[in-house]
Image (cartoon, rainbow, N blue to C red):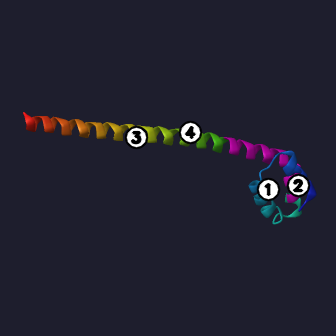
């Protein structure tokens, strides 16, 4: 592994997953592109952070929406069960009267 690349990973707090993926394609690049990657690593790291932040926001939105739908479903089921009980009671009272 390129020690400069490792230091850049550490400096910019790149995740293990991203380190692995960057390392995999790094060795496939021609030397000039490797140098460009190292020279422009700050830009790459900032883009990675933006993407991670966007994913985090989207994940939070999806989780919130999912929880809301689960709550709505639970409330619906509770209301349906209550309605079924009320209908049973009404039917029972009708039979008695």
Q: Nearer the viewer, mark 1 or mark 3?
A: 3
Where residue 4 appears, x then y in whole percent? 92, 54
How many marks do you count on the picture? 4
What residue is shown with label 3? 74
Bin the neighbour count of mark 4 within 10 Å (Cα to Cα): few under 14, some 14-19, many 20 and up.
Answer: few
Where residue 41 appears, x then y in whole percent? 84, 49
Bin the neighbour count of mark 1 within 10 Å (Cα to Cα): few under 14, some 14-19, many 20 and up.
Answer: some
Q: Which mark is residue 61?
A: 4
Q: Which mark is residue 19?
A: 1
Badge 3 marks a residue whose secondary structure is: helix
Quadrant where the image shows the N terminus: bottom right
Of the residues under marks 1 and 3, which one precedes in the sequence? 1
Tell me the residue at 75%/59% (across/down). Answer: 21
In this image, 79 relative to 58: left or right? left
In this image, 85 relative to 75: left or right? left
Q: CA distance from mark 4 to mark 2?
A: 34 Å
Q: CA distance from mark 4 to mark 3?
A: 20 Å
72, 44: nearer the viewer? 72
> Disc 4 vs disc 3: Cβ atoms closer than 8 Å?
no
Q: Is residue 92 magenta?
A: no
Of the residues under marks 4 and 2, which one precedes in the sequence? 2
Badge 4 marks a residue whose secondary structure is: helix
What residue is shown with label 2? 6
Where residue 34 appears, x then y in whole percent? 86, 59
* Range drawn in magenta: 34-53
Q: CA distance from mark 1 to mark 3?
A: 43 Å
Quadrant where the image shows the C terminus: top left
Q: CA distance from mark 4 to mark 1?
A: 27 Å
Tell me the residue at 23%/35% (across/down). Answer: 86
Q: Is residue 31 visible?
A: yes
> Disc 4 vs disc 2: Cβ atoms closer than 8 Å?
no
């Amino acid at each position: 592994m390129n020690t400069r690349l490792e230091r850049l990973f550490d400096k910019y707090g790149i995740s293990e997953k991203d380190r692995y993926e960057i390392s995999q394609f790094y060795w496939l690049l021609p030397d000039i592109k490797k140098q460009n990657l190292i020279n422009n690593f700050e830009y790459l790291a900032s883009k990675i952070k933006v993407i991670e932040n966007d994913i985090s926001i989207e994940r939070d939105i999806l989780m919130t929406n999912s929880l809301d739908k689960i709550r709505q479903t639970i409330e619906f089921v509770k209301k349906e069960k209550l309605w079924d009980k009320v209908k049973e009671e009404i039917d029972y009272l009708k039979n008695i009267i």
